[in-house]
Image: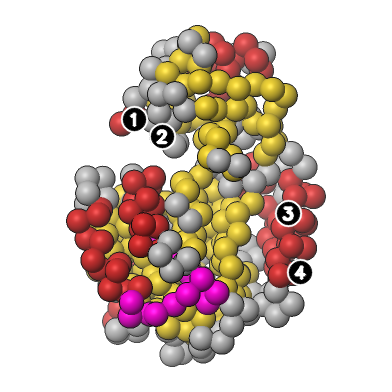
């Protein structure tokens, strides 16, 4: 298996795919103004090749913010691509497409991954997709694109999730998730007065959510929007913690980038030693995979902003680059199996 990465900061797709021959699966990352044109052009250049795409930034050793990037798998990969439509209403209506694609690829836990790009309603979409994948133990990684648009096989869809079932014909695959936060002291909350449709938390332990957050951190209301970089919430999910990013203040309530329900148990998180955590992640992957063909990752936009603020982004990409051929997407939310997570990194490693 081999991974190709090409880019054009000027949005020139022909430049981005220069040298790409006989791909077996393609991922497109474009800007909002050129997305539809790039989707059509990619299909004309590589007719019939399974492809998915979204609006978003991409990277290998540097980040392309507004142009176009292409990641392709070739030499020893088989893939099936499709979409689940009506993501905000009833994605399960299209579940037979995924069931058939999983059968066609005929993959297993050891050699197959599902990569998805979603236009919204991520938690519901992931529950739907994973209901099929878990029967074969197939892992999933992915993320949320911008502009409520995704693409699959040369066609643009709104309110949908595009996915690729990718099988490594010559080795293993494995998904990973990285969390650079840990619980802050013993703060623990029961959420109430929530609004699922608005991702809103009205109260924590019966007190106004905004006031609770401010009082603990001793910050002004104006600081809440950026303080999530250091202190997001965490939603307990068994032995795991899913990060919940704060979006903004609405009166005495807080809106988030992930749904929180009444009676959900939340904790307050604190930024850890991310340099050491990244090194540990790289070391773990190297231990698991002495031979690495490719790494595809999805990093949260908030991680990207945090790393940039701390002049760490280039160092981070260099650290991940020690694994070999590494490239990925800056997402607006990250996916790991059936979990929709914020401020995290998920990735898949191919042997």
Residue topped by disc 2: 259
Which residue is farthest front? 135
- Residue 225 is situated, as x and y percent measured from the top left of the image, at 53, 27
Q: Nearer the viewer, residue 11 or 152?
A: 152
- Residue 258 is situated, as x and y percent measured from the top left of the image, at 44, 37
- Residue 91 is situated, as x and y percent measured from the top left of the image, at 25, 53
Q: Nearer the viewer, mark 3 or mark 1?
A: 1
Q: Residues within 10 Å of mark 4 (few under 14, many from 20)?
A: few
Residue 287: assigned label:
4
How far separated are the C-alphas under marks 3 and 2?
Answer: 27 Å
Range of the magenta residues?
A: 103-117
Q: Earlier in the sequence, mark 2 or mark 1?
A: 1
Q: Reply yes or no: does residue 326 show up in magenta.
A: no
Q: Nearer the viewer, residue 270 or 324?
A: 270
Residue topped by disc 3: 278
For the residues bearing labels 2 and 1, Cβ distance under 8 angstroms: yes
Q: Is residue 263 above or below residue 28?
A: above
Q: Secondary structure at mark 4?
A: helix
Residue topped by disc 1: 196
Q: Secondary structure at mark 1?
A: helix
Q: Earlier in the sequence, mark 3 or mark 1?
A: 1
Q: Nearer the viewer, residue 87 or 153?
A: 87
Task: Answer left or right for 161 relative to 266.
Answer: left
Q: Reply yes or no: does residue 106 show up in magenta.
A: yes
Q: Is residue 72 visible?
A: no
Q: Is residue 124 above or below residue 260?
A: below
Q: Earlier in the sequence, mark 4 or mark 3?
A: 3
């Amino acid at each position: 298996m081999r991974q190709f990465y090409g880019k054009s900061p000027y949005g020139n797709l022909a430049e981005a795919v220069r040298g790409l021959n006989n791909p077996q699966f393609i991922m497109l990352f474009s800007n909002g103004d050129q997305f539809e044109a790039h989707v059509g052009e990619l299909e004309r250049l590589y007719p019939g090749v399974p492809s998915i795409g979204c609006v978003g930034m991409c990277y290998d050793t540097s980040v392309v913010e507004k142009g176009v990037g292409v990641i392709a798998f070739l030499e020893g990969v088989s893939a099936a691509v499709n979409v689940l439509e009506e993501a905000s209403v009833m994605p399960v209506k299209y579940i037979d497409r995924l069931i058939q694609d999983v059968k066609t690829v005929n993959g297993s836990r050891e050699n197959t991954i599902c990569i998805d790009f979603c236009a919204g309603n991520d938690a519901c979409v992931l529950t739907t997709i994973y209901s099929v994948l878990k029967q074969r133990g197939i892992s999933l990684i992915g993320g949320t694109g911008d502009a409520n648009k995704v693409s699959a096989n040369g066609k643009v869809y709104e309110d949908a999730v595009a996915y690729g079932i990718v099988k490594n014909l010559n080795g293993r695959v494995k998904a990973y998730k990285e969390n650079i936060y840990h619980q802050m002291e013993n703060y623990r909350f029961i959420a109430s007065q929530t609004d699922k449709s608005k991702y809103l938390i009205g109260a924590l332990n019966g007190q106004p959510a905004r006031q609770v957050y401010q009082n603990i951190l001793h910050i002004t209301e104006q600081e809440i929007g950026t303080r999530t970089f250091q202190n997001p919430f965490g939603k307990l999910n068994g032995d795991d913690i899913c990060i919940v990013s704060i979006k903004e203040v609405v009166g005495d309530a807080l809106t988030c980038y992930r749904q929180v329900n009444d009676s959900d148990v939340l904790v307050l998180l604190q930024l850890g030693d991310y340099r050491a955590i990244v090194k540990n992640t790289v070391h773990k992957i190297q231990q698991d995979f002495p031979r690495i063909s490719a790494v595809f990752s999805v990093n949260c936009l908030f991680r990207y902003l945090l790393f940039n603020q701390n002049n760490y982004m280039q160092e981070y990409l260099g650290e991940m680059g020690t694994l070999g051929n590494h490239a990925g997407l800056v997402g607006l939310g990250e996916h790991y199996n059936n979990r929709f997570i914020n401020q995290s990194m998920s990735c898949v490693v191919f042997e």
